[in-house]
Amino acid sequence: MSVLNKIARTLVSNRRGILAADESIGTMSTRLEKVGVEATAENRRLYRELIVTTPQLAESISGIILADETFHQKLSNGRTFPEYLHDIGILAGIKVDTGAKALAGAPGEKITEGLDGLRERVEEYARLGATFAKWRAVITIGDSLPSKRAVHANAHALARYAGLCQEGGLVPIVEPEVLMDGSHSLAKCQEVTTSVIRTVFDQLELMQVQLDGIVLKPNMVVAGSESAEQPSVEDVANATVEALRASVPPSVPGIAFLSGGQRPEVATENLAAMQNIDSLPWELTYSFGRALVGPALETWRGETGNATAAQEALSERAVANASAR
Ligand code: 5MM
């Protein structure tokens, strides 16, 4: 078993999953302000400290994805975040993309940037304790979207990122997110998700990425959030697994879903329903952001007195998702 394969398997097995705590400074600031907390570097650090020091977190969380700011910050005990995660048996990951920007010639679509200087950044993060990385591509469904060029450009960037990570010893989490914004049907989401993931694997193979040393982080196949017809949990589970069977090679060790704006309980139910489907070649787990930490942030609201209750809210979601597996 290669080192990359061992890390990838650690991330997705033993009924554990990944916590995405890598909100960029802009996103984290907006989320803090929404719950009445001033968006300062210290408050972002405090909030992330609350998350990672949640008791027994390592029983349900295998890895935590950090943003660059957090990666270099310290906990109150003087340990850096990656050092502390290592101490408690959780792998430290790092978001290495620099965000989704407007794609030239493709109105309404985005391309994720961050390839420039990535080899050197990967080297530095690995030296400081990262074992895996993340890059998120965003695909929008619309009247005539996504365009071929947006899908191709994002898949190509994901593959170049994945190659650079593996070269530097980090397991790449490959995240092509088909957004749930819009009024499209479940069938449309399934069609687009299948085609996007196929294109991503074409590019990964072209770039000679070692498929047993990655984790795929896709969206679940759902209807658009504004669609009048919302599918059942079983329909979501079946459509998602069908899309994955049609696009993901069996050599990939694990698939860790994003939650994408689904209510936390719904994301967990969907994940649980997929575990009942027989003969899947990959582990199916979670790499949730909002569906894991949303209730904790709502509970905390920046008050020291709410910290224990906030950690309990995170624990509840983490344990529920581990049980779903
Ligand atoms: C935690 O949020 C991640 C970073 O987002 P920005 O760079 O846009 O601030 C995001 O990539 C996240 O990891 C995925 O969207 C999964 O999170 P959800 O909330 O969809 O499970």
Image (cartoon, rainbow, N blue to C red):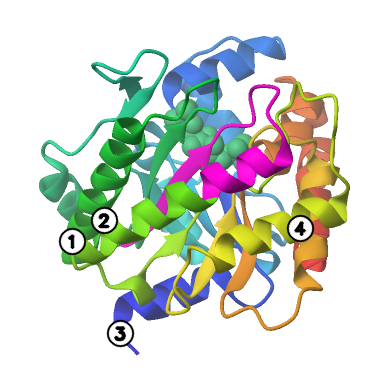
**SS at mark 2?**
helix
In terms of secondary structure, where does tag 1 sit? loop
Left or right, 70 with respect to 12, comes to: left
Q: Which residue is mark 2?
A: 203
Nearer-N-terminus badge (1/3): 3
Query: Residue 186 magenta-drawn?
Result: yes
Q: Nearer the viewer, mark 3 or mark 2?
A: 2
- The residue lying toward the viewer, choosing from 297 and 137, is 137
Check if mark 2's residue and mark 1's residue have beta carbons within 8 Å.
Answer: yes
- Secondary structure state at the residue bearing disc 4: helix
> In this rendering, which labeled residue sits more in front, label 3 or label 4?
4
What percent of the width, then of the height, locates residue 48? 56, 36
- Which residue bears the numbered disc 1? 207
Q: Which residues are magenta?
A: 171-193
Q: Which residue is mark 4?
A: 237
Which residue occupies 81% across, 73% down? 276
Q: Residue 239, how many percent across, how many down?
A: 71, 55
Is 54 rendered above or below residue 251? above
Closest to the camera, between mark 1 and mark 3, is: 1
Q: Earlier in the sequence, mark 1 or mark 4?
A: 1
